[in-house]
């Protein structure tokens, strides 16, 4: 059977990488005695995948994982896992699903809340932002490493921004909500969005002290956006 | 607690922030405000290295098992983290409760490597704790240190309130209990030090004075306080089966040096290699029973979720019931997909059977340590392996499908000639020939031989403690002699930095004057000296010149057998007579038997090895 589960990753645990998180789940399956499936072959590895890897330092309310395992009650699974998982990574809900599209290919949008400080009070930040969004093209440089060469490519990220709104402005403190494309058919990292904004609107944001939180992830079918659980 | 907002801000900027967050599985968070004794345990290197150290897991669990005591961890922050912390004025904190280190009762360092000593000063400084013991008043934490390098405590005498000599499983709680008692009465650091100085295994440097001769050798040691003993006896646990052994380990989020259960199977070593300090100071051999180990392994795997158990000890293949142990472990772990590994390998073919058993699927690389290139030199250092052993073992492992072999050597060993040095090349070539003589249908993969040479550092409490080290130039000459004579792309030769080994030799056989050198070097920016990208050799040399310290005096000088050595007041169990005997035998190229064949009267009292027949 396959269990699809939703979990959060917050607090200090946002500082562990995607790879660390994979290892954490792997060990947790062992420790919680989950009858997880293993791949065949020379070097068998457990069958599970976590969709849309989260960058280091970002909290998330909704992460998704698919796990292949021998029969087990979903409630039982959640209870056993949560006993072993640290308190900042806990499974919220889960259900048994049919073999079909994997969670990785399903996720196509992610919603974020982004909080940062402006260097000074900026008049009309909201209007400027809307103007910026009206551009047809917002280009960023994407650098890809291939062997030892760096390949630079210009990418227009405007189509990857589903929406972007100001949630709160309190003096220099700004909170944005945004829906960004995710997955293999176009993917925009919130960091890249803010960098482009910072550059075009000349905001001088302290990029490193920015707080980003992923608040939801969605699948898309026939122009409908829905939650994968 | 430190300012968490500031920490948060910093964590976003540094590499591998998970080094600083704690919260791992099996880490223990207690309410420290209720604790009677708060102990900060520090491994003076980065998290990734320190978390692979077994001793940390032992003491951490040992102390935290006591209801009223708390043990929390602190490591050396990597340079990027340090920079941010200094910029933001964030003091060093423990991983568990994010409490400032300076608010703990103890700060205990484990001394595994001399080149981490500057990190100790850096940790004190980042914690806002005065570096010199004499500058720390009644309210500062007691700064203590133990571990193998504490057998020569003198280079750190200036900074450490007291040292713990020997094994920590029993004495640690005795120390904390005595402290608790003193705290409940009327606390005075001096009174406590006077009291603890009477405890076997404790060395309080400030109760002693060293008088030097004009030639800088030691004239005498004066005991300044009537409670302090003249000789400090090492502490040793008698029975490893009843001794505290952790049933769980903290499991790091990030990948560390050893991502697996580390399980100690025995302590000590019977082989008597003359260069090996561990082999001398951990005598005698004491084993854990197979039953106890099976039980421990089971619990450790259960509690960590790890999929590999690494058996740890010196010369692991010497465990008397290794076959039985491996068999039982494999039987238990088969279903759970848990593997077993042995880190240090011996050069005889008996191990191949064991390897067969544990490496059922993967034929990863194998490591052997002939240590010296010629039989003559192996006799000098009493490394009891022969070329025949190597040939037999390698022949078999190639037939079983292995193709990657690492060979460890040392250069600069006593009495070494160029012929001995070139023996390294010869052995590597021999291994290559054996591979190609293996019938084609039996061998697998591409042959890869790595021969690596470290530069010999004579250590205290070994038969070579009196000997001068090779000079840096001589090390380079010998290393290149081998390197330039290996012309085969299947064989790679690498060697360790001779400059680092020179410094290591100075510090490991240093006296109290070396404290100033370490302090000054740290002030000039030295830290993480064991990391080649941070090692500042030129700075160390400049500082020595400035202080008038002659490095060659410590590293290169041959000592007279009757000279007072800085560490002579420590009693490690083996006698100085035995070490002298071994020294003389080595020069005569005479080997000494393994203790299991016959006792060599090394001076260990109540030795459990003696008369033990296998
Ligand atoms: S007393 Fe004898 S058997 Fe025991 S460690 Fe010393 S030499 Fe070996």
Image (cartoon, helix red, strand yellow):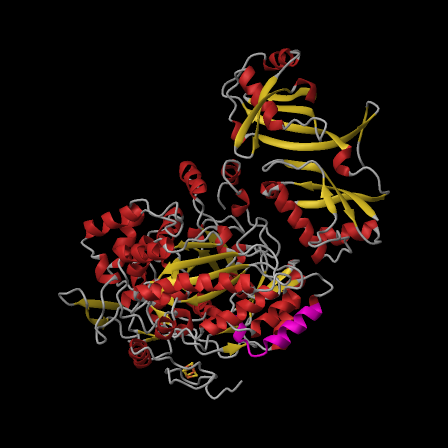
- Bounds of the magenta segment: B315-332
Instruction: Tell me the chief SS of the magenta region.
Output: helix
**Quarter occupied by residue B27:** bottom right
**Which of these two is toward me, B54 or A14?**
B54
Residue A180 shows in the view: yes
**Residue reaching furthest bottom?**
B611
Residue at 62%, 46% in the rendered image = A20
**Which of these two is toward me, B325 or B520?**
B325
Image height check: is A51 above or below B464?
above
Q: Is residue A121 magenta?
A: no
Image height check: is A169 above or below A21?
above
Determine the quadrant in which ligand 1 lies: bottom left
Q: Position of residue B596 (x, y in %)?
A: 47, 83
Residue B36 shows in the view: no
**Which of these two is toward me, B191 or B467?**
B467
Q: Position of residue B373 (x, y in %)?
A: 39, 66
Q: In this image, A63 relative to B514: left or right?
A: right
Residue at 62%, 27% in the rendered image = A190
Residue at 42%, 70% in the rendered image = B278
Q: In this image, B194 relative to B487: left or right?
A: left
Q: Is residue B320 magenta?
A: yes
**Residue reaching furthest right?**
A98
Q: Position of residue B430 (x, y in %)?
A: 46, 64
Q: Position of residue B578 (x, y in %)?
A: 33, 81
**Quarter occupied by residue B379:** bottom left
């Amino acid at each position: 059977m396959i269990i699809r589960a939703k979990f959060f990753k917050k607090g200090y645990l946002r500082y562990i990488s995607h790879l660390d998180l994979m290892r954490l789940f792997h060990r947790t399956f062992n420790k919680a005695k989950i009858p997880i499936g293993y791949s065949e072959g020379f070097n068998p590895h457990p069958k599970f995948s976590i969709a849309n890897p989260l960058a280091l330092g970002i909290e998330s309310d909704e992460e998704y994982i698919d796990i292949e395992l021998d029969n087990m009650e979903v409630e039982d699974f959640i209870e056993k896992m949560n006993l072993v998982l640290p308190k900042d990574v806990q499974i919220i809900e889960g259900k048994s699903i049919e073999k079909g599209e994997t969670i990785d290919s399903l996720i196509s949008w992610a919603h974020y809340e982004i909080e940062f400080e402006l260097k000074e009070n900026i008049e009309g930040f909201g209007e400027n932002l809307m103007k910026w969004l009206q551009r047809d093209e917002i280009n960023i440089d994407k650098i890809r490493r291939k062997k030892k060469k760096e390949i630079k490519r210009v990418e227009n990220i405007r189509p990857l921004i589903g929406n972007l709104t100001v949630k709160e402005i309190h003096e220099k403190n700004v909170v944005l909500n945004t829906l960004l494309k995710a997955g293999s058919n176009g993917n925009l990292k919130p960091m890249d969005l803010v960098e482009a904004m910072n550059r075009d609107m000349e905001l001088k944001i302290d990029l490193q002290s920015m707080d980003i939180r992923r608040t939801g992830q969605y699948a898309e079918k026939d122009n409908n956006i829905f939650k994968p659980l | 607690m430190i300012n968490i907002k500031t920490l948060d801000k910093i964590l976003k900027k540094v590499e591998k922030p998970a080094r600083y967050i704690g919260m791992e599985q099996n880490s223990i968070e207690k309410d420290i405000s209720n604790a009677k004794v708060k102990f900060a345990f520090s491994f003076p290197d980065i998290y990734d290295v320190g978390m692979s150290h077994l001793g940390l897991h032992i003491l951490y669990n040992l102390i935290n098992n006591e209801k009223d005591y708390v043990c929390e961890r602190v490591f050396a922050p990597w340079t990027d983290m340090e920079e941010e912390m200094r910029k933001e004025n964030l003091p060093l904190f423990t991983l568990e409760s994010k409490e400032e280190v300076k608010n703990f009762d103890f700060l205990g360092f484990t001394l595994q490597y001399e080149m981490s000593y500057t990190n100790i000063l850096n940790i004190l400084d980042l914690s806002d704790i005065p570096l010199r013991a004499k500058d720390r008043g009644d309210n500062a934490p007691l700064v203590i240190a133990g571990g193998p390098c504490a057998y020569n405590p003198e280079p750190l005498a200036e900074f450490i309130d007291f040292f713990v000599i020997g094994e920590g499983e029993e004495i640690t709680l005795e120390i904390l209990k005595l402290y608790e008692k003193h705290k409940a009465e009327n606390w005075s650091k001096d009174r406590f030090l006077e009291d603890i100085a009477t405890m076997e295994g404790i060395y309080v440097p400030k109760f002693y004075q060293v008088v030097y001769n004009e030639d800088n050798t030691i004239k005498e040691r004066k005991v300044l306080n009537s409670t302090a003993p003249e000789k400090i006896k090492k502490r040793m646990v008698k029975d490893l089966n009843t001794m505290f052994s952790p049933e769980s380990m903290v499991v790091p989020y990030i990948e560390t040096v050893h991502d697996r259960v580390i399980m100690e199977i025995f302590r000590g070593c019977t082989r008597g290699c003359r260069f090996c300090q561990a082999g001398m100071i951990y005598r005698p051999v004491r084993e854990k029973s197979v039953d106890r180990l099976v039980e421990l392994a089971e619990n450790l795997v259960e509690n960590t979720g790890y999929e590999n158990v690494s058996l740890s000890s010196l010369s692991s293949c010497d465990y008397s019931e290794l076959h039985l142990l491996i068999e039982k472990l494999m039987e238990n772990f088969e279903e759970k997909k848990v593997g077993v590994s042995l880190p240090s390998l011996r050069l005889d073919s008996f191990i191949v059977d064991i390897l067969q058993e544990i490496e059922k699927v993967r034929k990863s690389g194998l490591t052997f340590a002939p240590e010296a290139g010629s039989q003559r030199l192996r006799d000098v250092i009493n490394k009891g392996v022969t070329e025949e052993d190597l040939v037999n073992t390698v022949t078999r492992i190639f037939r079983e499908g292995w193709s990657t072999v690492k060979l460890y050597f040392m250069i600069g060993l006593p009495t070494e000639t160029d012929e001995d040095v070139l023996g390294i090349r010869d052995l590597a070539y021999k291994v290559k020939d054996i591979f190609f003589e293996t019938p084609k249908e039996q061998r697998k993969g591409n042959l890869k031989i790595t021969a690596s040479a470290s530069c010999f550092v004579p250590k205290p409490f070994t038969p070579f403690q009196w000997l001068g080290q090779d000079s840096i130039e001589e090390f380079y000459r010998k290393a290149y002699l081998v390197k330039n004579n290996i012309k085969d792309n299947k064989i790679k030769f690498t060697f360790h930095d001779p400059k680092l080994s020179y410094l290591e030799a100075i510090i490991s056989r240093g006296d109290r004057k070396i404290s100033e050198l370490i302090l000054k070097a740290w002030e000039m920016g030295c830290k993480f000296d064991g990391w080649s990208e941070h090692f500042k050799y030129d700075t160390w040399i400049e500082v020595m010149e400035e202080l008038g310290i002659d490095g060659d005096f410590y590293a290169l000088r041959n000592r007279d057998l009757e000279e007072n050595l800085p560490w002579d007041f420590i009693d490690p169990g083996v006698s100085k007579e035995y070490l002298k005997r071994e020294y003389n035998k080595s020069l005569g190229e005479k080997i000494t038997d393994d203790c299991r064949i016959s006792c060599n009267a090394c001076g260990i009292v109540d030795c459990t090895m003696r008369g033990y027949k296998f």
